[in-house]
Image: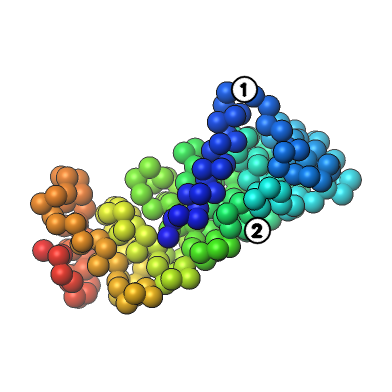
Amino acid sequence: MRAALIHAMVLLLALSATACRGDTMDAKQVFTDPQVAALATAAARGDAADVREQIRQGADPDAQGDKGMNVLQYALAAQNPDGLKALLDNGADPSRPGLGGSTVIHNAAITDDAVYLEILLAHRADPDAPHGVTGAAPLASAAGPRTDKQFRLLLSAGADPDRADRTGNTPLHAAAMINAGAHVLALLKAGANPRAKNAQGQTFQAYYFKLPAERLGADARQERSEVVAWLREQDVALEAGAG
């Protein structure tokens, strides 16, 4: 489910690493249109006035470059919150699929610093924006302890806990597949359908209970017991392995 997004993020991180080394990110290597390259450079610098001026002169804030990367994603790769905000303030659409089919919302959902997602949501970015290839929502991407803050930001912003991708996997399936018990429980409490099935006819339980309980760490066992208790309270039949 996450493969396309991970591929996109590898490319984003490669650019980010360049920025972290202090090297100059060359927008001309990504965007062949000189106007768009100038806009991306301004965003990477966090120069709001120049971003506004480049767009006023005709630069497309939604333009895509190499491998589909859009200008918002370039600002994210440059690790410049001010540049991201300036683009959004001047009409860039965060729901547009870009690099690898991901939107900048998907990228921000799995970026270590939650400030980028906070900026996007403050600008009314759609928390359910679909991935251009998989159809998955950002909430599914954010499942997992490393991005707990992003996951909860999306839920608080009204992300649909039942939004399925093109194979029928919901955020609940995504959390279950990586044994993110705290997020499984959070999704259930947020109204996720525990009986939802994917294209393989499986509910989240088929993935969440796949690993034997005795192989879990203490925290994961506690999370599993809380999920089981919730399912029993809601009269949801337990599947094999639930224990």
With respect to residue 46, does 8 lie above or below? below
| Residue at image coords 14%, 65% | 241
Identity, as a three-letter code, of the amino acid under mark 2: Arg
Image coordinates for residue 137, horizontal then vertical, percent: 49, 61
Image coordinates for residue 55, horizontal then vertical, percent: 82, 46
| Left or right placement of residue 85 versus residue 127 in this view | right
Q: Nearer the viewer, residue 95 or 121?
A: 95
With respect to residue 195, does 60 lie above or below? above
Distance from label 1 to label 2 (Cα)? 29 Å
| Left or right placement of residue 70 versus residue 201 in this view | right
Q: Nearer the viewer, residue 127 or 135?
A: 135
| Residue at image coords 51%, 49% | 7
Quarter placement of the N terminus: bottom left
The secondary element bearing badge 2 is classed as loop
| Residue at image coords 15%, 65% | 242
Q: Nearer the viewer, residue 121 or 172?
A: 172
Q: Which residue does the numbered mark 2 point to in the structure image?
A: 96
Q: Which mark is residue 22?
A: 1
